[in-house]
């Protein structure tokens, strides 16, 4: 199980063993993101932010238990961010 430190609070959080599910929506940084596609070989997920139609490729996505906030989706970095027209 991985751990990481949240930059804004310095809290240590732990990665959950739960697998991401295509079609499910998870919170992240005050917004919700829906998993559109998973690629286990590349360890990426295409995520969609419904509030404004933003898409990006999340690298190394995982669910974390955030103290005081609950379960959130986090990823290492993202690429190919765009809005579909």
Image: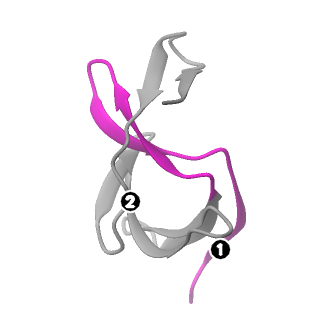
Going from N to C along the chain, the mark reached first, 2 or 1, is 2
Q: Position of residue 39 (x, y in %)?
A: 58, 73
Q: Residue at x 37, y 64 (%)?
A: 51
Residues rendered magenta in the picture: 59-85
Position of residue 67 in the picture relative to residue 85 (left or right): left
The residue depicted at 33 percent of the width and 66 percent of the height is: 21
Secondary structure beneath dot 2 equals loop
Mark sitting on residue 6: none
Residue 76 picture quarter: top right
Asked if residue 58 is positioned above or below residue 64 in the image, the reply reads below
- Residue, x 28% and y 27% (percent of image)? 69
Find the residue positioned furthest to the bottom.
85
Display colour scheme:
one colour
Quadrant of the image occupied by residue 19: bottom left
Q: Nearer the viewer, residue 26 or 39?
A: 39
Circles 2 and 1: CB atoms closer than 8 Å? no
Identify the residue at the far right of this view: 79
Q: Position of residue 14 (x, y in %)?
A: 44, 25
- Residue 76 inside the magenta-drawn segment: yes
Per the picture, the main secondary structure of the magenta-coloured stretch is strand
Per the image, label 1 sits on a secondary structure element best described as: strand
**Which residue is painted at 37% across and 37% down in the image?**
16
* 73 over 38 or under it: above or below: above
Q: Using the numbered discs, state the Cα–Cα distance from disc 2 to disc 1 in whole angstroms.
A: 22 Å
Q: Please, is residue 27 above or below residue 4 in the view? A: below
Q: Is residue 4 magenta?
A: no
Name the residue nearer the viewer: 41 or 29.
Answer: 41
User: Which residue is identified by label 2?
Assistant: 20
- Tell whether 67 sits left or right of 6: left
Q: In this rendering, would 17 be left or right of 57?
A: left
Q: Quadrant of the C terminus?
A: bottom right
Pointer 1 residue: 82
């Amino acid at each position: 199980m991985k751990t990481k430190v949240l930059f804004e609070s310095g809290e240590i959080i732990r990665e959950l063993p739960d697998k991401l599910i295509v079609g499910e929506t998870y919170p992240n940084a005050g917004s919700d993101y829906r998993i559109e596609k998973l690629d286990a070989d590349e360890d990426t997920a295409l995520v969609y932010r419904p509030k404004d139609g933003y898409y990006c490729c999340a690298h190394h996505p995982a669910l974390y238990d955030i103290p005081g906030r609950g379960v959130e989706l986090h990823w290492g970095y993202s690429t190919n961010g765009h809005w579909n027209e």
